[in-house]
Amino acid sequence: MTYQEYYNKLQEEFAKRSDKFIKAEKNLSEANGFADINLLSDFSEAKRRFDEAANKYHEFLNYVKEHGIDPNDEIS
């Protein structure tokens, strides 16, 4: 797998998790009064997964920048 392919994989995961987090946040914010406890649980899980994906994505970008990685190189 090249660095570019790995970047694409991380970017797709980050986008997917971002979308789920935004939807969970919207669902929670639209709840009237005392919300269903499942909405809070769904939001917490989506937030956790979003944070994990964001961290992996940004750590990879930092690594590539700091080490001057060629995107076409194979990951060892």
Image: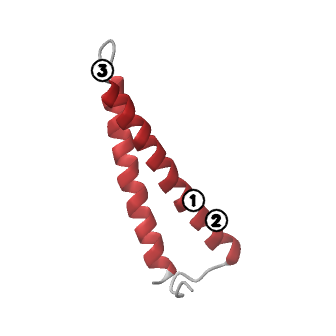
Q: Residue at x 51, y 53 (%)?
A: 52
Residue 35, image x, y percentages? 32, 19
Q: Residue furthest top?
A: 33
Q: Nearer the viewer, residue 39 or 11?
A: 39
The residue mark sitting in front, 3 or 1, is 3
Q: Residue at x 31, y 30 (%)?
A: 38
Residue 76, picture quadrant? bottom right
Report which residue position mark 2 lands on: 62
Circle count? 3
Q: Give the secondary structure at mark 1.
A: helix
Q: Nearer the viewer, residue 39 or 5?
A: 39
Residue 40, image x, y percentages? 38, 29
Residue 5 appears left or right of 66:
left
* Amino acid at dot 2: Asn
Discs 3, 2 touching: Cβ within 8 Å: no
Discs 3, 1 touching: Cβ within 8 Å: no
Quarter in which the N terminus is drawn: bottom left
Q: Residue at x 58, y 67 (%)?
A: 60
Residue 43, image x, y percentages? 39, 35
Label of residue 67 in the image: none
Relative to residue 4, is residue 51 depicted above or below?
above
Badge 3: residue crowd in 10 Å (few <14, some 14–19, many ≥20): few
Q: Give the secondary structure at mark 3.
A: loop
Discs 1, 2 touching: Cβ within 8 Å: yes
Badge 1: residue crowd in 10 Å (few <14, some 14–19, many ≥20): some
Q: Residue at x 45, y 48 (%)?
A: 50
Report which residue position mark 1 lands on: 58
Report which residue position mark 3 lands on: 31
The residue mark sitting in front, 3 or 2, is 3
Relative to residue 10, is residue 35 depicted above or below?
above
Badge 2: residue crowd in 10 Å (few <14, some 14–19, many ≥20): few
Q: Give the secondary structure at mark 2.
A: helix
